[in-house]
Image (cartoon, helix red, strand yellow):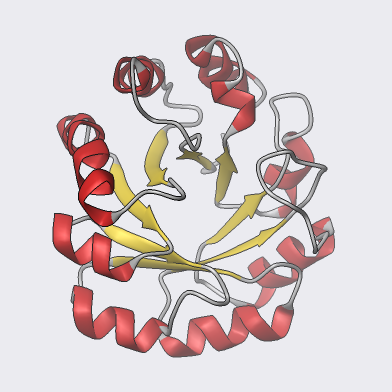
Amino acid sequence: MSDCQLYLISPLDVSGTFPDRLARALDAQRPEMPVTAFQFRVKGVDQHEAVRLAEPLQAICADRDVGFIVNDSVALAKRIGADGVHLGQGDGDVREARELLGREAQIGVTCHNSRHLAMEAGEAGADYVAFGAFFPTTTKDVEHRAELEILEWWQMYFELPCVAIGGITPENCLPLVEAGADFLAVCNAVWSGDEVRAVQAFAERLT
């Protein structure tokens, strides 16, 4: 059995019935590929609104022992007491985030397809590095394409967990798992349809 786990990324719209969808998705997880993290990723809202939107989702994750990670904003992560923050290359320094959020916070860094950026993130004290995009995706504009070799290389030389991201579906995920991805970060594959079926479908790929 693989040790690979799911890392759910929120759609940009987490209002309305989304908290119910998140709860259903987390409750659908299976031991073959558990959901261990959820990234809160909203754009174009002020921090007050972001706090309001995050509150029910953070509670749902806490009830199920799923890490609640804030995308981009160290300030928001600090304000709501999130489990961690995910930093893009322009979102701040790992060391500064650690100083603000504390030793227990999970800090991840987007490293695109760069071995150099990943090694830098590890040296700075990141808890995980994220490589991608591995496949075409509509979640965000893709400037960098990553190949399976970077996962294989990372696993060969480093113990720090790595996340694969970008267009990952139940149908195409197996090579990423076999190459050594510790986490699969998924968004559209789960939220564009039946979230329960999608989470189960990822687990079924490993059985």
In the picture, measured across the screen, residue 83 lies left or right of residue 85, that is: left
Measuring 72% from the left and 79% from the top, which residue is drawn there? 115
Q: In this orientation, which residue lies closer to the viewer: 115 or 33? A: 115
Q: Quadrant of the C terminus?
A: top right
Measuring 48% from the left and 12% from the top, which residue is drawn there? 196
Percent of width and height locating residue 191: 54, 23
Percent of width and height locating residue 17: 34, 15
Percent of width and height locating residue 104: 20, 69
Q: Above or below — where is 125 with respect to 62?
A: below
In the picture, measured across the screen, residue 64 lies left or right of residue 179, that is: left
Q: Above or below — where is 80 with respect to 159?
A: above
Q: Above or below — where is 71 with respect to 167?
A: below
Q: Quadrant of the N terminus?
A: top right
Q: In this orientation, which residue lies closer to the viewer: 49 or 26? A: 49
Percent of width and height locating residue 160: 50, 70
Measuring 52% from the left and 72% from the top, which residue is drawn there? 159
